[in-house]
Image (cartoon, rainbow, N blue to C red):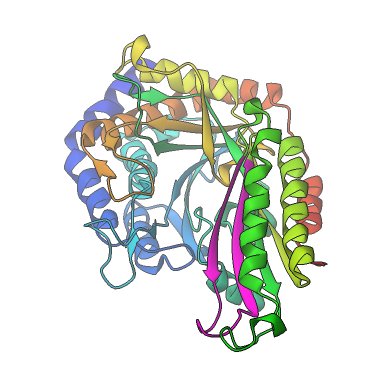
């Protein structure tokens, strides 16, 4: 079959099996699990991929699974990724009532698109026509949340990194991969927009700060205490005052939550804990903002006469989109959408550990539609399953055809023209350097 014949066959299969994909997406949606807890979701996807006849590994990064197609082929290897985890959104009506977990970021859609491409290629009978390997990877823990739980897993030696793709990079899971692709749905706020194939994002650094003061009776002798809550409050205010020093083009974001505000209200708080995330769309701006946040933390501690223990951990790098991959994906999307329904480029100010992957190899992180309401909010809804699930499955499958058909010449061009941001060794060194604990006083 030529490429066009393969695409027509794939579209026919996807239309015939649409209910299989919709049922899978709904099942995952109804069983949300947060990062490194995706036991049921891993089993659901691994069982489904094994049923297609793919050799499937389980527990690839504590949770997660990886299916292998065309293992006997010698061409380039493409990894198609879907993210397993939900987040915590207890105000959403569809959340898990016990845990508060909810797929309010659409990862159930991603994993369904990943599975749909694997299913369609198998049922269309065209894997033998492709000159390369494909791995279908359901990866855990894209959302960097529940840090106490993840820190416990690290101490137990079960994981090395908070983020799932970072964990997989560190374990060598991407060492034999040449190209990586995934989609992520998005509530486009521009009327009529359905897709954005070419997207970049912010990266971030994660900080856990413990402000340490001195306890005293808040009513009888507050002057004998050192108020750790006031240290945290002053530090947060100082972070806010830094905002005018951030360049608009760098899309810097600084946000915080206090996870422990003291022990009892009638004692001066002696220990207060603060989680802070610093984001920017390039590493220079990210490191600059991190220094300014550190100054703010130090100022809060010094002003009140206390101490602050700061624990930095690597978050996620900015996504560096590959123009060649985005163009192939876009051309296939034009079979379903008009030119004016696709953004030529989108700067996403959220973050993804796909940024880490994109620094090492050609990567696609296309944004798709079919939803409304804000990501990570109680308003999130899937409103068009055709746009959310079915068209992205078709576009992803067609893109695989274009990359790997005819001797995989298009994939070879993408690989040849890619310029990595850093080597894997440099990346591992970055992880080592950014993860540190220090005292501000």
Q: How many tags in the picture?
A: 0
The picture places residue 280, in percent across and down from the top left corner, at: 64, 38
Q: Is residue 64 magenta?
A: no
Q: Residue at x 39, y 60 (%)?
A: 88
* Screen quadrant of the N terminus: top left
Closest to the observer, 144 or 271: 271
Where residue 192 sits, quadrant-wise, is top left
Q: Residue at x 35, y 46 (%)?
A: 106
Residue 42 at least partly seen = yes
Closest to the observer, 397 or 122: 397
Residue 437 at least partly seen = no
Majority secondary structure of the magenta segment?
strand
The picture places residue 131, in percent across and down from the top left corner, at: 53, 30
Span colored in magenta: 253-279
Q: Is residue 99 left or right of residue 401?
A: left
* Screen quadrant of the C terminus: bottom right
Q: Residue at x 64, y 78 (%)?
A: 271
Q: Is residue 164 left or right of residue 283?
A: left
Q: Is residue 297 above or below residue 367?
A: below
The picture places residue 160, in percent across and down from the top left corner, at: 66, 66
Q: Is residue 275 magenta?
A: yes
The single residue placed furthest to the front in the displayed view is 220
Q: Is residue 44 above or below residue 117?
A: below
Q: Is residue 92 left or right of residue 360?
A: left
The picture places residue 15, in percent across and down from the top left corner, at: 20, 32
Q: Residue at x 38, y 47 (%)?
A: 105
Q: Is residue 235 above or below residue 178?
A: below
């Amino acid at each position: 079959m030529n490429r066009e014949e393969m695409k027509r066959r794939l579209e026919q299969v996807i239309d015939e099996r649409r209910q299989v994909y919709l049922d899978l997406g709904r099942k995952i949606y109804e069983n949300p699990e947060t990062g490194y807890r995706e036991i049921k979701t891993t089993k659901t996807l691994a069982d489904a991929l094994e049923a297609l006849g793919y050799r499937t590994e389980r527990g690839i990064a504590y949770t997660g699974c990886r299916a292998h197609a065309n293992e006997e082929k010698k061409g380039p290897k493409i990894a198609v990724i879907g993210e397993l985890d939900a987040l915590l959104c207890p105000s959403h009506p569809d959340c898990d009532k016990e845990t508060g977990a909810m797929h309010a970021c659409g990862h159930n859609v991603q994993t369904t698109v990943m599975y749909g491409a694997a299913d369609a290629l198998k049922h269309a009978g065209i894997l033998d026509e492709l000159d390369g390997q494909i791995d279908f990877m359901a990866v855990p823990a894209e959302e960097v949340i529940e840090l106490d739980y993840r820190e416990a897993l690290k101490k137990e030696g079960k994981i090395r990194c908070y983020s799932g793709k970072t964990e997989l990079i560190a374990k060598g899971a991407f060492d034999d991969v040449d190209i990586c692709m995934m989609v992520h749905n998005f509530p486009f706020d521009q009327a009529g927009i359905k897709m954005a194939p070419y997207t970049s994002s912010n990266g971030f650094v994660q900080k856990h700060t413990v402000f340490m003061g001195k306890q005293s009776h808040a009513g009888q002798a507050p002057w004998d205490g050192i108020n750790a809550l006031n240290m945290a409050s002053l530090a947060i205010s100082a972070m806010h005052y830094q905002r005018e020093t951030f360049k608009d083009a760098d899309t810097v974001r600084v946000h915080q939550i206090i996870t422990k505000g003291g022990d009892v209200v009638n004692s001066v708080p002696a220990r207060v804990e603060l989680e802070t995330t610093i984001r920017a769309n390039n590493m220079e701006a990210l490191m600059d903002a991190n220094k300014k946040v550190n100054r703010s933390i130090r100022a809060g501690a010094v002003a009140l006469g206390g101490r602050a223990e700061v624990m930095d951990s690597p978050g996620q790098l900015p996504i560096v989109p590959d123009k060649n991959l985005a163009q192939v994906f876009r051309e296939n999307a034009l079979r379903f959408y008009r030119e004016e329904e696709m953004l030529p480029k989108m700067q996403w100010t959220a973050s993804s550990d796909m940024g880490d992957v994109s620094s090492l190899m050609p990567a696609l992180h296309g944004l798709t539609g079919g939803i409304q309401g804000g990501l990570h909010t109680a308003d999130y809804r899937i409103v068009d399953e055709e746009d959310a699930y079915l068209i992205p499955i078709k576009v992803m499958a067609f893109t695989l055809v274009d990359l790997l058909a005819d001797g995989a010449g298009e994939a070879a061009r993408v690989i040849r023209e890619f310029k990595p941001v850093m080597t894997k060794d440099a990346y591992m060194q970055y992880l080592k350097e950014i993860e540190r604990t220090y005292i501000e006083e």
